[in-house]
Image (spheres, rainbow, N blue to C red):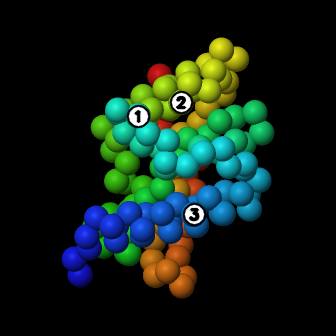
């Protein structure tokens, strides 16, 4: 099936909301969605106690061509890290030596029965 960009965005938003609810059910607080910079975009920004968590959400129908989390390669990681640095500066959080973490939420399967995997500390910033 071919998807147009509007369909892809709508699907992406659906799975980002699913990931957001999942993380909230596990005690994280939502701070922002779709934070963008000239470097890229961060799907979700959450707070886990005193830690700011930058979350990349990835969806795949199945694992035939690899796991969803594997799609977050080093290039994508660098874009997320740079965007996170800008977010922290704009929010003036960098002044307080804020603890940060980069997580990936991978969602696989059919909409009615998705499998959600939360990868804490999936990669590290500078």
- Residue 111 lies, in percent from the top left, at 49, 80
Could you say whether the residue bearing mark 3 is in a helix, strand or loop?
Answer: helix
Q: Is disc 2 in contact with disc 1, using a CB cutoff of under 8 Å?
A: yes
Pointer 1 or 3: first along the chain: 3
* Between 106 and 45, the one nearer to me in the picture: 45
Q: Which residue is mark 3?
A: 17
Pointer 3 or 2: first along the chain: 3
Pointer 2 or 1: first along the chain: 1
Tag of residue 87: 2
Residue in the picture at 66% in, 63% down = 21
**From what the image shows, is residue 103 above or below residue 85?**
below
* Between 50 and 95, the one nearer to me in the picture: 95
Can residue 45 be seen here? The reply is yes
Q: Please rate how many residues cluster around mark 3, counting C-alpha atoms within 10 Å: few if below 14, some from 14 to 19, many from 20.
A: some
Residue in the picture at 35% in, 33% down = 39
Residue in the picture at 77% in, 53% down = 27
Can residue 63 be seen here? The reply is no
Could you say whether the residue bearing mark 2 is in a helix, strand or loop?
Answer: helix
How far apart, in angstroms, are the residues tagged by discs 2 and 1? 8 Å
Residue in the picture at 63% in, 21% down = 92
Q: Which residue is mark 1?
A: 37
Farthest residue to the bottom: give it: 112
Say left or right for 1 vs 76: left
In the picture, the quarter occupied by the N terminus is: bottom left
Say left or right for 110 vs 88: left
Say left or right for 121 vs 22: left
Say left or right for 113 vs 26: left
- Residue 53 lies, in percent from the top left, at 61, 40
- Residue 82 lies, in percent from the top left, at 42, 28
Farthest residue to the front: give it: 6
Residue 9 in which image quadrant = bottom left
């Amino acid at each position: 099936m071919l998807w147009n960009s509007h369909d892809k965005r709508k699907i992406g938003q659906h799975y980002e909301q699913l990931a957001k609810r999942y993380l909230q059910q596990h005690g994280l607080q939502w701070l922002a969605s779709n934070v963008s910079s000239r470097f890229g975009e961060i799907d979700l920004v959450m707070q886990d106690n005193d830690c700011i968590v930058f979350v990349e959400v990835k969806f795949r129908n199945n694992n035939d061509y690899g796991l969803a989390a594997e799609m977050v390669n080093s290039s994508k990681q660098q874009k997320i890290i740079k965007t996170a640095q800008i977010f922290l500066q704009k929010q003036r959080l960098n002044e307080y030596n804020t603890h940060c973490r980069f997580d990936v939420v991978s969602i696989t399967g059919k909409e009615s029965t998705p499998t959600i995997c939360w990868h804490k500390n999936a990669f590290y910033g500078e």
